[in-house]
Image: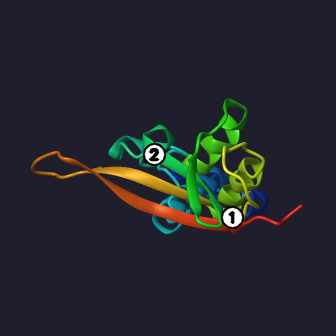
Amino acid sequence: MTQAPMSEETTRTRWWWYLPSAVLIGVACHQIWLTRSANLTPWSGGGFGMFSTIDGWGNRNLQAFAIRPGIRRELEIPPALQEVTRRARAFPSETNLRALAAALADAPTPDVGPLAAIEIQMWSTDYDPVTLAPTGSLLRSLSVAVDAP
C-alpha cells in the first residue's frame, strides 16, 4: 500500500509544527545564558535547571549601605520594598540594583550629613562538596551616587 503524496499546501504549513519546540528551546537557552552571565537564579526566568541548585532568590543575602562622609551604615530593608528586593535577589542586574538603591535613598538613618551613595551587595551561599561548610560569595556589588537635594 502506498501513501498518497502530501499536497503542496500541507508541506508549506508544516514548519508551524516546529514553532512551539523552537520557542521552548529559545527560552531555555536564554535563561541558561542569563544564569551564567548575569547571575539570574535558575529558579527564575523559565525555571530550567531549578532543581539542580539551591541558588534561589530566597537563599541570597542582600546587604545595603548608606555612605556618608566618614560613615558607612548598613540599612535595614523596609517591608514596603519587599517586591523590589525580591526582584533584585532573583536577578541582580544593574537596573534592578539601581531601582533598589533609588528606593533606599530615602531610608532614615541616625547619621547626619549629606548622603553620598547607596552601596548594594548581593551574596550567595556556597557549600564545600566535602565538608558541606557554608561560605558566602559575592555575586554583585554596586555603588550608586545619590544626588544632593
Residue denoted by label 2: 60
**Farthest residue, direction top:** 79
54 horizontally vs 63: left or right = left
Quadrant in which the C terminus is drawn: bottom right
Q: Nearer the viewer, mark 2 or mark 1?
A: 1
Labelled pair 2, 1 in contact (Cβ < 8 Å): no
Residue denoted by label 1: 117
Q: Residue at x 73, y 32 (%)?
A: 80
Distance between the Cα atoms at labels 2 and 1?
23 Å
Q: Is residue 32 above or below residue 37?
A: above
Q: Residue at x 73, y 44 (%)?
A: 107
149 horizontally vs 25: left or right = right
Percent of width and height locating residue 67: 63, 61
Q: Residue at x 49, y 50 (%)?
A: 41
Residue 45 in view here: no
- The mark nearer the N terminus, 2 or 1, is 2
Categorize mark 2 by other alpha carbons within 10 Å: few (<14), some (14-19), many (20+): many
